[in-house]
Image (spheres, rainbow, N blue to C red):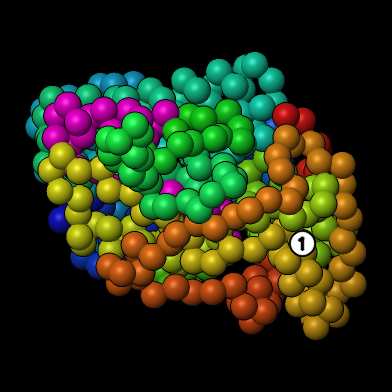
Amino acid sequence: MHILILGGDGYLGWPTAMYFSNRGHDVTVVDNYFRRNACTELDVGMLYPVPTLLERARIWHELTGREIKVVIGDLKDPEIIRSFFNGRVSYQWAVNQGFTGIPATVIHYAEQPSAPYSLINYKYANITVANNLLITNNLVWALRDFSRDTHVIHIGTMGEYGTPNIDIPEGWIEIEHKGRKDKFLFPRHASSLYHTTKIMDTDLLWFGVRMWDLRVTDLMQGPVYGMETEDSAIDNRLMTLFNYDEIFGTIVNRFVTQAVVGYPLTVYGKGGQTRGYLNINDTLQCVHISENTPAKKGELRIFNQIMETFSVNELAEMTRRVGAKLGYEVEINHLENPRKESEEHYYNPTYQGLIEIGVKPHYLTDDVMEGMFQVVANYQSNIRKDVIFKGIKW
Ligand SMILES: NC(=O)c1ccc[n+]([C@@H]2O[C@H](COP(=O)([O-])OP(=O)(O)OC[C@H]3O[C@@H](n4cnc5c(N)ncnc54)[C@H](O)[C@@H]3O)[C@@H](O)[C@H]2O)c1
């Protein structure tokens, strides 16, 4: 199977590329280093240096004999996406990389993925809107024009739903109104401009499904934690990028890093904010199972991709407990909340769909967090305290 990964240099994209490559798929990754360049521009640092995408593909080939094809290109350019599907590879770079065959599955990770980034100022807001919506729209039109059977797996976010005062289903809700019934996308309440673009992505994909019978799986993912996967274990140079700053770091990754470097945990406000979480290895599993059981033609299939829920206070307590066991004295600091969000709220999402099709969850236990502490501690001298919290305001 030929699998195309948009955003293949990213936190989730690179481990996904190795995962499918290791299972015998023909994998092509596309990226323009947006994430790395944004980290450089904003000077937020990463826990350890990561070789370029081309270098990583070369290391992967040397160690496994398997090939991951790399294309460096900006997916805002429609011609780049179209060239993967129109059977006429017009780009010399693609030919040089040995590109062949129309992808059976495209995994769409290529977005500006940070809520604080999208709210730094109008410039970053514009970048987020333009980047995320153009890429998704380009993909929809390329499939419409050349390859309606290709299965799209898009990573949405649980943040599309917000924190409503009613239970959250997996994507859809049936509404009875004045004696008549119909099924709709569940009402969405984004908590940032980034999350708003993810809602609009879902709408663009839903439009393509209704108009042109595209097949789409949209995975509403919660914040991911962890950095090690089975495939990266063979060589440290294959580890995925890891941010611990306020802009690009996800909360568990940030808390563990803060604990290791003796920075009081940055809990925003009361800390009752509750979300669904998952291990990076479960992202791979969920995407793999979705690829194995594709959405039907003309179907927008939505799963909530989380394995368990925690409040920020529960995560902070767990970090303190695990840190104490390892000899770290972890302090918890309730900061004035720079975000506009409910700090105490009802939260009851459904997340059975992926488990029903075969996903076996990994949970965030003390042992799992201890493993993360050990990896982060190896790079303690790289950690910059000045990038941990800047307080980007909503
Ligand atoms: N990591 C999480 O916890 C999490 C949670 C929920 C949803 N998501 C979603 O999952 C997806 C992947 O997230 P991630 O954490 O791996 O983010 P990431 O930033 O590490 O990966 C995205 C990749 O896409 C690339 N990209 C962005 N714009 C591009 C463009 N115009 N052309 C080519 N490449 C481009 C980036 O350079 C980056 O390598 C995103 O859509 C994100 O919204 C992530």
Please state which of residues 48 and 249 is positioned toward the viewer in this rendering: 249
**Left or right side of 217 for 280:** right
Percent x, y of residue 157? 48, 45
Where does the magenta region start and end? 200-225
Q: Please say whether residue 204 is one of the residues in the magenta stretch.
A: yes
Image quadrant containing the N terminus? bottom left
Q: Where on the picture, by quarter, is residue 70?
A: top left
Residue holding disc 1: 313
Q: Check disc 1 and give the amino acid type.
A: Asn
Image quadrant containing the C terminus? top right
Is residue 348 at least partly visible in the picture?
yes
Q: Where on the picture, by quarter, is residue 227?
A: bottom right
Percent x, y of residue 385? 84, 50
Furthest residue to the front? 179
**Left or right side of 333 for 1:** left
Q: Please say whether residue 231 is one of the residues in the magenta stretch.
A: no
Q: Residue at x 53, y 39 (%)?
A: 113
Q: Residue at x 14, y 35 (%)?
A: 213
Q: Residue at x 89, y 55 (%)?
A: 333
